[in-house]
Image (tube, rainbow, N blue to C red):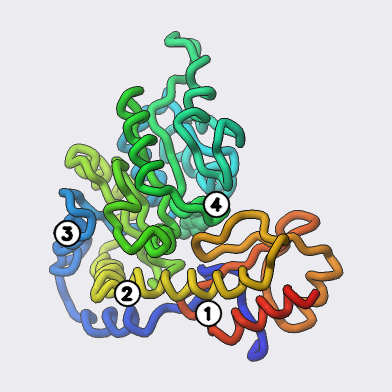
Amino acid sequence: MSDVKPFLSDNAAPVHPKVWEAMRASDRADNPYDGDALSAQLDERFSDLFGRECAALWVATGTAANCLALSTMVQPHGGVVCHEEAHIEVDEGGAPGFYLHGAKLMLCADGHGGEGAKLTPDQIAAHIDPIRDDVHQVQPHAIAITQASEYGRCYSRAELEALSAFAKSRGLGLHMDGARFANAAAFLGGSAKEAAYGVDSLAFGFIKNGAMSAEAVVLFDPEQASLAKYRRKRAGHLQCKGRYLAAQILAMLDGDLWLANAAHANAAAGEIASGCGERLMHPVEANELFVTLSPEERDALRAQDFAFYDWGADAARFVTAWDTREEHAAALGKAIASL
Ligand SMILES: *Cc1c(COP(=O)(O)O)cnc(C)c1O
């Protein structure tokens, strides 16, 4: 394994040393569940970060974070509008149906301006406007978007403003899957506030970006927050030693480690992108690259110890992380350029 140059995924990356340190430093007895001194800091720390009041709850997976947030705004007879390639549809094993008691995912395909699995108000309107206000039809209750998107694209402040105004005008909740929120925020200039502009809830990912087992559900409405606390326990996600999750999140927030780690990953992706030219299937804005490569070309890269996933028959996906070595990124860029 020692020679492998890893680009499989950012969740293959190790735990950041500062996260380990923070867990060691807080390794002592304290109140169980979320009654400890560290969990008690979360609401204020996130409210400062976002410049508006919010509550933040730790959970151990992004799937739980998305579904718990959605469960505060979607009734069992309602629906969540999302892109057809959204993680909640494709990669969560049916968890939304489980947490939302059968609520429907209402899938938008590309078109009407959407690109890279991003949604636009026009695209959503085209999908939901034909739905009759009639008990026979599932009514949308929320919209879920992904920042950065499943193809590593970011929603700008202006795009979020438009989506949030649209959601409000239709009485829909707006949830953001932020498994790679840090990478998006780094791309958009470093402001968490701008990168989550106008959303009602955010699943703020830390694990792919250096934490071990803690993601934050951030809720901007106190009623939603209260609901989510009960739902978290009912879902079996109220860890009795939750202080170790809080320690991870606080370590990531301290000194903006979350942003520095993401900026590093994004820069490494940029370095690789500079060798990919026309092969890039999507503009590289965060830390994922989708690159057209034949099976033979992928074999050639694997023979040089680059590890990555295939993306369909004629492409590959490369993901950088907080620990990606600059020489590995440079080598990959060069290797792709010279194919
Ligand atoms: C990784 C990821 C998640 C979280 O996945 P878990 O395995 O449940 O932690 C959520 N959304 C997106 C877009 C992801 O890439």
The residue beneath circle 1 is 324
N-terminal label among 1 and 2 = 2
Please tell me the numbered disc located at residue 48: 3
Q: Label 4, secondary structure: give it.
A: loop
The residue beneath circle 2 is 257
Q: CA distance from mark 2 to mark 3?
A: 16 Å
The residue closer to the viewer here, 71 or 144, is 144
Compared with 290, 173 (above or below) is above
Kindly tell me whether residue 90 is visible in this rendering: yes
- The spot of residue 289 in percent (x, y) is 61, 63
In the shown orientation, is residue 279 left or right of residue 144? right
Q: Label 2, secondary structure: give it.
A: helix
Residue type indicated by callout 1: Thr
Q: Is mark 4 within 8 Å of ligand 1?
A: yes
- The spot of residue 309 in percent (x, y) is 68, 65
Kindly tell me whether residue 236 is visible in this rendering: no
Q: Label 3, secondary structure: give it.
A: helix
N-terminal label among 4 and 3 = 3
The residue beneath circle 4 is 150
Q: Quadrant of residue 77?
A: top left
Q: CA distance from mark 2 to mark 4?
A: 23 Å
